[in-house]
Image: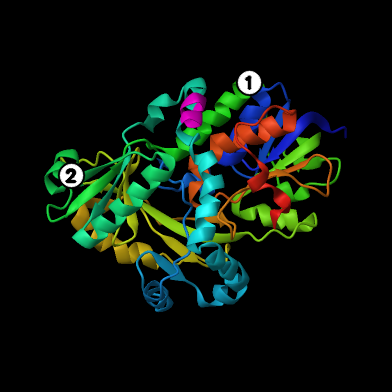
Amino acid sequence: MTAIKFDTVVLGAGIVGVCVAVHLQQRGRQVALVDRKLPGNETSFGNAGLIQREGVYPYAFPRGLGALLRYARNQSLDVRYHGDALFHAAPFLWKYWRNSEPAKHAAIARSYSTLIEHCVSEHRALAANAGASALLRPTGWIKVFRSTAAQDAEIRLAEQWRREYGVEFETLDAARLQQAEPDLDKALQGGLRYTQADSVSDPNALVSAYAKYFETLGGRIFTGDANTLRNGWEVTTNAGTIAASSVVVALGPWSDVLSSRLGYRLPLGVKRGYHMHYSPRAGARLNHPVLDVENGYLLAPMARGIRLTTGAEIALRDSPKTPTQLAAVEPIARTLFPLDQRVDDQPWMGARPCTPDMMPVIGRAEKHQGLWFAFGHAHHGLTLGPVTGRLIAEMMTGEQTLVDSRPFRVDRF
């Protein structure tokens, strides 16, 4: 049977893959988007819904002895681990810890911030084209504090980010916080609002809207297994074999399965996370996503209800769910905001794809003609999907790139 021909096949229909496909299709490429599920139904389905314009420093590994000892007890609310995963993850965690040294972290931020700078504007442009602007809320998001010490530390950090990268924020004393969020715990010390960020009322709906826009441009979506990829580049799908002269691997936490088969040893780790939706008690309303800084969870108003998202779980990507963090923070979250009944039958779990230098892999694979990688965005997959899509498309079509792509190159490891 003759293969269906395209210019490019994009493997993975999460936020990154969909955005790559859109930007290539906008530039006149004939693109096929392939995933085993509908767009936005894996890692991109479950997140806090933040487009983090303030996220100029990627999340570093804790380096203080006190924090490390606290995490070693494996009872922390924001980070948990599986014992059997630590041996497997040890080389990755060691490199991650080393790259989190302050001078190295600052150097990483100088490159990483070039992507973050464009995250909101690129999302807004794509959402406007996709008819999905109503899913974006340009109201920022809030960190809340239970102690003066925690608030002062976060304000010092925000002031540093403002000096270095122009990140805007406003501090909220207890009265102003209550004005912004009347139904939060009245005992809170105060808050800090990042004013340049957007939030999303339904991340899955946003990815789906971008995918539908891709189809209106003439792109095609197929159900298939990325691991059937063979040189040519050919992939087996529900509609038969499709083939293209170029392929983009945007498989999130599964990207290393395919890349390693193709001969690339890329240090990709995962941080798992959980979420659950709740109905608010009668009359209660949450206006912004709210992070409880001292307890390591976030509440976000979503179309389905109030979404409670957990911190990080270090575990093997495909090991069974262990939503102990969710169980631990739920009672605390109920004191922060009046949550009512659980809406979901069971907790959702996903895996964030991470690199040890905290930066995504975006660029050409050096050993194969026509092979490109776009993955490893860790906590900022939703944030950086559109700008990554634009960057890859510009590189593939020979345009001047929006930012310097060299820091994100595949061969840096």
Residue at (19%, 58%) from the top-left corner?
Answer: 335
Q: Which segment is the magenta one?
A: 121-126
* Mark drawn on residue 50: none
Position of residue 241 in the picture relative to residue 116 (left or right): right
Residue at (69%, 38%) from the top-left corner?
Answer: 10
Q: What residue is pinned by disc 1?
A: 217
Q: Is residue 242 visible?
A: no
**Residue 86 percent across, percent down from the top left:** 55, 74
Q: What residue is pinned by disc 2?
A: 177
Query: Gap in Å between the C-alphas at discs 1 and 2?
Result: 44 Å
Which quadrant of the figure has residue 403?
top right
Of the two numbered discs 1 and 2 on the same chain, state the one appearing first in sequence. 2
Q: Quadrant of the N terminus?
A: top right
- Is 358 inside the magenta-drawn segment? no
Type of amino acid under label 1: Leu
Which quadrant of the figure has residue 150?
bottom left
